Amino acid sequence: MGNFLTVQIVQTAMEIGLIYSLIALSLFISFSILNICDLSTDGCYTLGCAVGAVVTIAGHPLLAIPASMAAGACSGFITALLQTRFGVQSILAGIIVNTGLYTVNLAVMGFSSNLSIFGTDTIFSLAKGLSGAAWWQSWYKLIMLGLIVALVCIVLYWFLGTRLGLSIRATGDSPAMVKASSINPAFTITVGLCISNSLTGLAGSLIAQYNKTSDINLGTGMVTIALASLVIGESFSRKSGNMAVRILCVPLGSCLYRLIVSIALRLNIPTEAFKLVSAVIVAIALILPQVKSSLQLRVKMHRVRQTAKGGEKDA
Amino acid sequence: MLELKNIFMTFNPGTVNEKKALEGLSLKLDTGDFATIIGSNGAGKSTMFNMITGTYFPDEGQIILDGDDITFVREHIRSRYIGRLFQDPLMGTAPNMTIEENLSVAYLRASIGNRGSFSRISKKEKEFFREKLSLLGMGLEDRMTSPVGLLSGGQRQALTLLMATVVTPRILLLDEHTAALDPATADKVLELTREVVEDRKITCMMVTHNMQQALDLGNRTLMMSDGRIVFDTAGQERAGMTVNDLLRRFAQQAGHSLSNDRILLSTEEGR
C-alpha cells in the first residue's frame, strides 16, 4: 500500500475532493432538494474559475472568493429566471445558460482560452505564510479547504432550517403543498438556484487559485463528476432523514470519489481514457443500489422456496 | 363571505378538445356557511375550486372574498387565507420533511410580514404544534421529528387538515378529502373536519360523492351540473330531505338524472 498510495497522493485527492464537494453540494441543492436538473454546472464552474483568476491577478485573492460566488449566483439567477418566469424546462434552461456562459467565460478571461496566476499571491500562498511550522507547511491546503467546506456545510445546514430554507425544501418535495402554503415557488426556486450556483462559483474560484491557472475547458464534464460524488455520498445517507447527515455525506462522497480516481490513475490508466473511467464510476455508483435490491430479492426468493420445500416434506 | 359572479371558463377553446367547464357559475356563501357540493364527473366542481384558489383564472366573471376582488390575485398570495385539501392524501404534505417542518411551512401564513425569513422554528412554536397535533388523537405529537412519508394516508390527511387550518383560513375547500381513505379512517378525518369547522366557524365548501354525507354535514347543499349550480338547499327544506328527494330534485333541475357510478353506489348502500 505504501508505494501504491502515498500520503502525497491521498492528500491531493482529499484536497481536490474537498473543492469538488462544493459542486456536489451545489447539485445537492438543485438536484436533491429542489428536484431540478440544473445542467449549467460546467459553465458556471468555469465562470467561477475565470472570475477568480482575473480578480486574483488584479491582486485581490480574498476578494476573488465573493466575486466568483456572486458571478455564480448571477448565472443561477438567469437559469432560474428562464424556468420560473418564462416557463423554459429546467434541463433546457441549464443547457442554454451553459452554452452562453462559454462566450462569457472567454470574455472574462480577455478572450484568451487560458490564464495563468503564477507569480501573484493566492489565498493558499497567503495561508502558507501564516506559520513556519513543518506540519502547517505540508498540510495548510488541506486544512484550509477543510475549514471552508465545513463552514459551507454549517451555513447550509443552518439555512435549510430557517423559514426560507424550509420553503425551498418544500418546493422540491411537494409542489402541490407549496402552492397551498403561501409560498411562491418562483421565488424559492430562484433563491435556491442562486445559492446552489454560488457554491459552484466558489469551487471555481478555489480551483483557479489552487492550480494557479484558469482554462476555458476546465469545466467540461464537471456535472458528471459532481453527480458521481453526490450519488456516492447519498448512498451513505439514503435512509437518513436528518439534514446534517445528508449534508455531511456529500463531501464524504466527493472525497471518496477522488480517492477511487487516484487509485484508477495509479493503475496506469492512460489520461485519454479518463473521462470514460469517470463515466463508468458514475454508472456503477448509480447501478449499485439496484443491483443490491435485486440480490436481496434473489436471497429472499431462495429462502421462501427452501421453506416451502421443507414444509412439503414435513407434510 | 365568498361571492362568485357569473363565471365562465373554457379549456382548449377553438379545438376539438374544447371543454366548457364553467358556464355562468354564480354563488354566494355567507360567513360560517358549510356547504356540501355534489354533482356528476365533469360538472365543474374541481374547476370551481381551482378558480377560488387561483390555479386558473376565469375567462369571465368575478370572485369576491370578504369584499376584496381576488379574481386575478396569484395563487401563492391567496393561499394565505384559503385552505385546501385534495382527494389524494399524499398531495398536501412534503414526504421527506418531518411533521414539525411541514407544520412550520404551513404556519408561514401567520408569519408573513412580521417574521424574518431567516428565523428558525422556535421552542414556543414547537409546543404549539405539539398541542395542535395532540388534538388529532393519533399520537402524532410524539413523532414530530419523523418524516411525513412514514405516516399512513389517514394520518397524512389529518395532518393536512391541521396544516390548512393552523392559521384559521377565511375559507376552507375540501375536495373529496376522505374519498381515498378506508371507511373507519374516513369517518375519523370527517369527524375532525366537522370539529374544526364548527369550533372556529370556518366558511367551508366540501365536495363529496356520498349523498347521505352531503345532507348530514354542514348547513347547505349545492348541486352542480354543466358548469352551473342547479340546485341550492338549506334550512327547513334541507333538514327534511332524503337521498331520494335529492336525486329527484337533481333530475328535475338538471334535466337528466345523476350519472355517476360512485354516487349511485353510495346511494344504494345509503341508509
Image (cartoon, coloured by chain):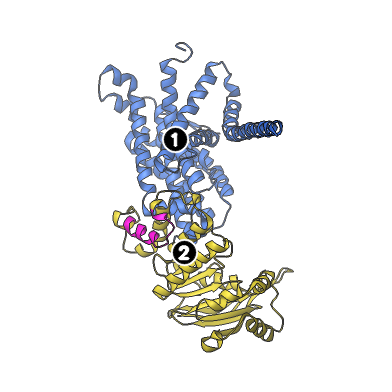
Chain colours: A blue, B yellow
Mark nearest the camera among 1 and 2 is 2
Quadrant containing the C terminus of chain B in the rendered view: bottom right
The one nearer the camera, A66 or B104, is B104
Neighbour class for label 1 at 10 Å: few (<14), some, many (≥20)?
Answer: many
Q: Is residue B6 above or below residue B95?
A: below
Disc marking residue A28: none
Q: Which residue is mark 2?
A: B161
Check disc 2 and report its element: helix, strand or loop: helix
Is A21 one of the magenta-colored residues? no
Check disc 1 and report its element: helix, strand or loop: helix
Q: Residue at x 30, y 24 (%)?
A: A128
Q: Residue at x 39, y 73 (%)?
A: B200
Q: Residue most toward the top? A: A3
Is B136 one of the magenta-colored residues? yes
The one nearer the camera, A7 or A246, is A246
Q: Amino acid at mark 2?
A: Leu
